[in-house]
Amino acid sequence: MRGPKKMRFQLTAVGLACAVLVAGCGGGGKEGADGGTAQSVSFLFPGGEMVARPPAIATVALKATASSGGPITFVSNTPTVCTVSGSTASLLKAGQCSINANQAGGNGYAPATARQIFVIPRQPSQVYFMNPGWLPLDGQPLTLDVTSSVADIPPVLTSSTPTVCTVSGTTLTKVADGLCTITATVNGGDIFETSKVESTIPIGSAKAPEITFLSGYKTESLALKDGHYEAQSNEGGRIVSNGGSSETGWWCDGRCATSISADGSSWSDTYTWDKELPHTTDGAWWRVWTEMDVYAPKVSFLVDGDQDGGTRIGPQKALNFTLAENQEWFDAGDRNVEIDMFLGHYVKKANGDSCHVKLRTHLFPTSPAATKYSLNLKEFSVEEKCELTNLDVWKELQTYPIVFIRFAPGSGNRSVQSTTAPAPSYPTKFTLSGPITFQ
């Protein structure tokens, strides 16, 4: 008679999975109920794979061994969720799948079974709601632009403010002045996760909620790094200033100056060209520049990949800020300011370069003194397309966050000398004061 076999248990506990060992009888070396030697079945955890998008069906390989060395038969205990053919399990829908690994016994061994129970996750889903922004109170219904990542399951729209607006299908009816709140829901059933998005739309006299991009500057954080100045906003966003000219390799070369007011409410950035200016008369192209990059709260840089960190726009329609120019620059002919918004929309170009979609508009200051400006977001244009086509400004703003805003002269002062600095001196200076907001 053969010597006793040692009983071997292997239980795998991962997530919600469990394994149950059922032998013909008790421990190793004892006889089973049918007179055979008890054996163990080791059944590796097969979970982790999510249900596939129809018509595809996800499958997983089942792996189990018996201490007797005998063959294993797999059986599904939940055939509406998962089925088994040979050693392959087909995942039919999201839910709890239970599979037994059976060894029938024989050759002196009692039968044994190990069970694995695991959760099949749903496919992720996403709702895309293009907030139309402020709407006039009139009798014109509006078709809302709402889609989902699940092609054959359209979002269901509901209004939680029926005294302000109602919705039928995707048609919005404006009822009264106020903030209209619409929820778009995708019920994913057995395959997809249920997801929802709530969007607020100002109607009539109502205004969109204000988003503070920057309220002020941390004076103790101003530092000179690698030839440019850096600081932080009160919200923890990084601030970077720079400057230069075509004649200095686009570096500051000692001609940049940055300051923060004592109360942290304003930032001034200056580039001063202090040489003779034959470039303005010899016909050669040249430029002086200075710029400030203001990052969103708690953001310090762009990443290679779509970026979640940043400020997301909903119904807000305008970028608001206060800006001043020095008198010399204002008196120069070309005093426009370029306003760029860099988005979290990332593209790798055909040549391998990293690229983020950038929107731009131009501001022509009406006074050198500190003046409040409000720029319509829908009037920005796509300045950097990253080799993409048919980009829509409003859809870009609704889909991707604003990572940072750049303020820079279209062309700095190169013709009006300063009356307060040693001549010849041609300063270009701008000052941002107070908060930067979206509303």
Image (cartoon, rainbow, N blue to C red):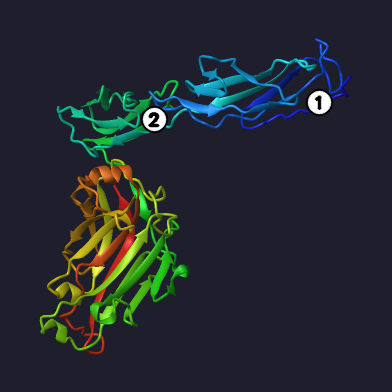
Q: Position of residue 58 (x, y in %)?
A: 47, 27
Quadrant, the N terminus = top right
Secondary-structure class at tag 1: loop
Q: Residue 308: x percent and y percent? A: 41, 47
* Crowdedness near tag 2: few (<14), some (14–19) or many (≥20) residues, C-alpha within 10 Å: some
Q: Secondary structure at mark 2?
A: strand
CA neighbours of label 1 inside 10 A, class few (<14), some (14 to 19), many (20+): some
Q: Residue at x 67, y 31 (%)?
A: 13
Query: In this view, which residue lies farthest toward the top?
Result: 34
Residue type (three-letter) at the residue carrying disc 1: Met
**N-terminal-most mark, 1 or 2:** 1
Residue marked by disc 2: 196
- Look at discs 1 and 2 and give the one toward the viewer: 1
Residue at position x 47%, y 20% in the image: 92
Which residue was labeled with disc 1? Answer: 7
In the shown orientation, is residue 60 left or right of residue 325? right
Looking at the image, residue 15 lies above or below residue 242: above
- Determine the image quadrant of residue 390: top left
Q: Quadrant of residue 126?
A: top left
The residues bearing labels 1 and 2 have C-alpha atoms spaced at a distance of 51 Å
Q: Is 100 located above or below residue 424 in the figure?
A: above
Left or right? Give the position of 1 relative to 410.
right
Of 268 and 226, which appears nearest the observer?
Answer: 226
Q: Quadrant of residue 293?
A: bottom left
